[in-house]
Each structure stands twice: as C-alpha cells, then as structure tokens.
Image: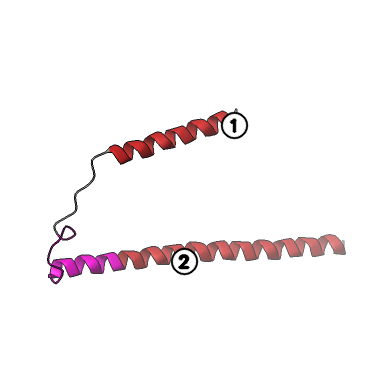
Amino acid sequence: MMLKRLFNVAMLILVVVTWLQIVRPALACAVCFGGDPNSSMTQGVQSGILVLLGVLCSVLIGFASLAIFWMRRAANLERLVRANEEAG
C-alpha cells in the first residue's frame, strides 16, 4: 500500500517535471540577452543578483545554525536523561 502510494507520487513528480521541461523556454531580458555590460541597467541587475545571493546565503546559514543548535540540544538532553536514569 505504502509502496504503491510512493510510486504514484514519484510518477506525478516525473510528469510535472517533464511537463515543465516541455513548456516553451523563457526568453532573456534585454540586459541578459547581450546588452551593454557597462550600462547602469546591467550594473544594477548585477548588484540586485548579488543582494539576492547574500539574502539566500544568510537564510541558509540560519537554517544550518538552527539544525546544529537542535542537534547539540538533543545531545545534551539525552545526556541529562541518561544521568537521571543512572542516578535514580
């Protein structure tokens, strides 16, 4: 039962990914398509990309820090539980 459901979900994902690949590709904007690399618009787009990468990295570092915090907290909790079991 569980295997059949997993297979159905995998097939659905495969169909959706295939459908998304078949859809017409998006055309690049004038800046990305080969505009003047020294224009202020191109430099603004590049700056925006760097800002978005900075935000993305900050969020990913936050998630990684949270996961590390939870792992350390779980280890401390397990150590305390074992100490309480041994004591009493």
Report which quarter residue 1 is drawn in: top right
Query: Could you tell me the amino acid type at mark 2?
Result: Ile
Residue at point 48% right, 36% down?
A: 10
Q: Is residue 21 above or below residue 77?
A: above
User: Residue 48 colored magenta?
Assistant: yes
Q: Residue 56 in the image: x percent, y percent?
A: 38, 63
User: Residue 39 colored magenta?
Assistant: yes
Which residue has dot 2 on it?
61
Question: Dot 1: within a 10 Å radius of its alpha carbon, few (fewer than 14), some, or many (20 or more) residues?
Answer: few
Q: Nearer the observer, disc 1 or disc 2?
A: 1
Helix, strand or loop at label 1? It is: helix
Q: Is the C terminus in the top left, top right, bottom left or bottom right quadrant?
A: bottom right
Of the pair 42 and 24, the residue shown nearer to us: 24
Report which quarter residue 76 is drawn in: bottom right
Q: Residue 16 in the image: x percent, y percent?
A: 37, 36
Q: Are marks 1 and 2 in contact (CB under 8 Å)?
A: no
Residue furthest toward the bottom?
38
Q: Residue 79 in the image: x percent, y percent?
A: 75, 64
Q: Is residue 81 rendered to the left or right of residue 39?
A: right
Residue range (magenta) = 31-50
Q: Residue 78 in the image: x percent, y percent?
A: 73, 61
Q: Is residue 64 rendered to the left or right of residue 43?
A: right
Disc sitting over residue 2 in the figure: 1
Report which quarter residue 32 is drawn in: bottom left
